[in-house]
Image (cartoon, helix red, strand yellow):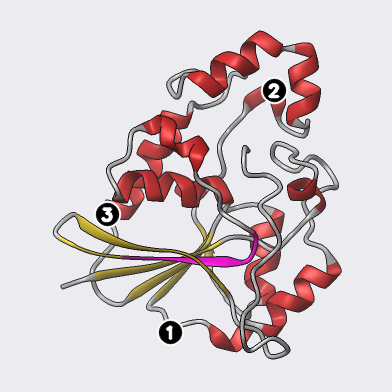
Amino acid sequence: MTSRVTLITPAMSRSLRQARFGGGADGDAIDDSAAARARSAAGSLPRAARVRVSPSARCRQTAAALGLDGADAAELSGLDVGRWTGRTLDEVGVVEPEAVGRWLADPTCAPHGGESVQDLCGRVARWLDALPPDGRTLAVVEPEVVRAAVVHVLGLPAPAFWRLDAPPLAATELSGRAGRWNLRLGQALPTSSSPSSPPPPPDTAAKL
């Protein structure tokens, strides 16, 4: 039996626009215009046997705008960046340039005191491989979770994580049988006002 998974990235928020780690105290809410776009796509999603959500404000709000009632999944949390949470990559680069350089170059490195990119990829891989094959799983997840999933299903080396973009409010389709996966990347969610599904905004937080 084939497992089918649809991963949806959150709508645009201030933290995504600013490339801010973890959103910070007040920057994680999705934009009003982005929420409206998500609401207009609410009826376009495939039927799912189960719905899961990354435990962040922007993912919960996106799921609600899409009309989804999903359970938080801790294993789908965004990358834990420890003491860098709430700061932008530029801010961290000014005060800890060597640490940022090591982090970007070595997927096993976690100079911020959180988890490494390799740890994230392993966590997401375990979640995918444990999914039941009965029906579709639909999940609203952080962009880095989508990238980690793609690394796993294509058997890519961990450094490829930084070469993948996951734009806001886009769907990535996975299907697999006995550990062999197929991938359909980054489909824009159709909306009632835009039946031709124009491209979503660029992934301004592609490196978070």
The quarter of the displayed image where residue 158 is located: top left
Q: Are marks 3 and 1 in contact (CB under 8 Å)?
A: no
The image shows residue 4 at horizontal and vertical percentages of: 31, 70
Question: Which SS type dominates the magenta stretch?
Answer: strand
Whether 204 is drawn above or below 1: the answer is: above
Please tell me whether residue 129 belongs to the stretch shown in magenta: no
Camera-side mark, 3 or 1: 1
Q: CA distance from mark 3 to mark 1?
A: 20 Å
At label 2, which amino acid type do we have?
A: Arg
At label 3, which amino acid type do we have?
A: Ala
The image shows residue 201 at horizontal and vertical percentages of: 71, 62
At label 1, which amino acid type do we have?
A: Arg
Which part of the image, by quadrant, shows the N terminus?
A: bottom left
Q: Which residue: 71% across, 48% down?
A: 204
Q: Nearer the viewer, residue 112 or 204?
A: 204
Q: Which residue: 42% across, 30% down?
A: 159
SS assignment at label 3? loop
Badge number at residue 47: 1
71 to the left or right of 60: left
Q: Tell me which label, 2 or 3, sits earlier in the chain.
A: 2
Q: Which residue: 55% across, 57% down?
A: 141
Q: Which residue is mark 2?
A: 83
How many other residues sit within 10 Å of disc 3, few (<14), some (14-19) or many (≥20)? few
The image shows residue 203 at horizontal and vertical percentages of: 66, 52
Q: Which residue: 77% across, 32% down?
A: 88
Q: Are marks 1 and 2 in contact (CB under 8 Å)?
A: no
SS assignment at label 2? helix
SS assignment at label 1? loop
Q: Which residue is mark 3?
A: 130
How many other residues sit within 10 Å of disc 1, few (<14), some (14-19) or many (≥20)? few
Q: Tell me which label, 3 or 1, sits earlier in the chain.
A: 1
